Image (cartoon, rainbow, N blue to C red):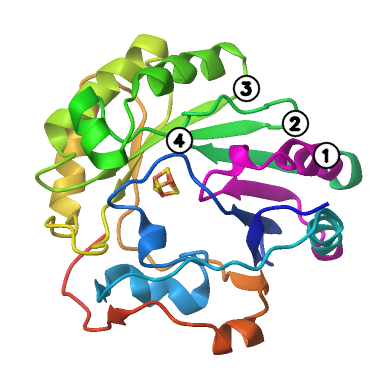
């Protein structure tokens, strides 16, 4: 059975695997995959976050079959698995992968989703729900889709009882403090204790927005904090674990087409 898994990354020290599925039902202008198609947490990719984009990367088109995914994760002894970007819930094999991992490895399965598609949560232990914007027109402009169904699914997933957190990318001058405050107010209407994680926008494609600074994210966190008790963002700290690519292998990635970026580092940020 063919899956849409095009990348498996793994952090050996914490036994955490990151499954990346192809296909998405949104077309976010700031999607990091437009710059870094393989896991941006890979040690080899960490420097790309701050790199200036120079054109766009093309998405990989080699996939594992179902047995290949399961065998790889069993071989690694994964204890937690993130089902993530593009949009894992669109792959019909995703629920079966989650169920098989529960049965074989008793993994903790975490789904990252944009929420446009109501996912099968039978074997999902936690959901990280990515909210792009609260204003419907802004959402439409940024993602190509209305957020009406997404906001409804946010509540439906919460009501399903699966533990959940929300996250948003702060984009200076676009999805900034005011917009984040509106999202926080919406999240608080569902659960004022929910964890809300803010990420900093990394420059992607030919978008006009600058990368988000620590100050941009702090300001948004402060605005969200008026509604939510639990707002979180990462500061510039060295990561304590290493992440390698299992599929494709690191050796294969040495020969893969690299994203087109300008590697001049900027003296900033998160
Ligand atoms: S939902 Fe995620 S994967 Fe899909 S386009 Fe938006 S940022 Fe990219």
Identify residue for label 4.
114
Instruction: Check mark 4 vs ligand 1: CB closer than 8 Å? yes or no.
Output: yes
Q: Residues under labels 3 and 2: Cα distance? A: 10 Å
Query: For mark 1, does the 10 Å Cα neighbourhood hold few (<14), some (14 to 19), or many (20 or more) residues?
Result: some
Query: Based on the displayed image, in which of its 4 quarters is residue 180 positioned?
Result: top left
Left or right of 12 in this view: 239: left
Residue 42 placed where, x, y %? Answer: 52, 70
Q: Which mark is residue 102?
A: 1
Q: From which residue to which does the magenta span run?
A: 75-102
Query: Based on the displayed image, in which of its 4 quarters is residue 134 positioned?
Result: top left
Left or right of 37 in this view: 100: right
Q: Residues under labels 1 and 2: Cα distance? A: 7 Å
Name the N-terminal-most of marks 1 and 4.
1
Q: Is residue 198 magenta?
A: no
In this rendering, the answer to whether 11 lies above or below 43 is above
Q: Which mark is residue 162?
A: 3
- Contact, CB < 8 Å: mark 3 with mark 1? no
């Amino acid at each position: 059975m063919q899956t849409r898994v095009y990348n498996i990354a793994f952090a050996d020290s914490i036994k955490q695997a990151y499954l990346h599925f192809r296909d998405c039902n949104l077309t976010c202008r700031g999607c990091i995959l437009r710059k870094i198609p393989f896991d941006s947490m890979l040690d080899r990719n960490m420097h790309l976050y701050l790199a200036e984009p120079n054109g766009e990367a093309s998405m990989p088109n080699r996939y594992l079959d179902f047995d290949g995914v399961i065998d790889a994760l069993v071989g690694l002894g994964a204890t937690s698995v993130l089902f993530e970007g593009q949009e894992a819930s669109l792959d019909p094999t995703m629920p079966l992968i989650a169920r098989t991992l529960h049965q074989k490895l008793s993994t903790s399965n975490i789904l990252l989703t944009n929420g446009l598609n109501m996912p099968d949560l039978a074997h999902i232990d936690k959901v990280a729900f990515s909210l792009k914007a609260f204003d419907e027109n802004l959402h439409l402009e940024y993602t190509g889709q209305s957020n009406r169904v997404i906001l409804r699914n946010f509540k439906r997933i919460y009501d399903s009882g699966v533990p959940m957190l929300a996250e948003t990318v702060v984009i200076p001058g676009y999805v900034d403090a005011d917009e984040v405050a509106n999202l926080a107010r919406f999240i608080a209407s569902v659960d004022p204790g929910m964890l809300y994680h803010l990420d900093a926008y990394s420059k992607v494609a030919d978008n006009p927005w600058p990368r988000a600074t620590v100050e941009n994210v702090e300001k948004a966190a402060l605005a969200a904090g008026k509604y939510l008790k639990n707002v979180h963002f990462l500061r510039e700290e060295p990561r304590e674990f290493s992440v390698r690519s299992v599929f494709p292998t690191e050796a294969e990635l040495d020969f893969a087409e690299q994203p087109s970026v300008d590697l001049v580092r900027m003296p900033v940020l998160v």
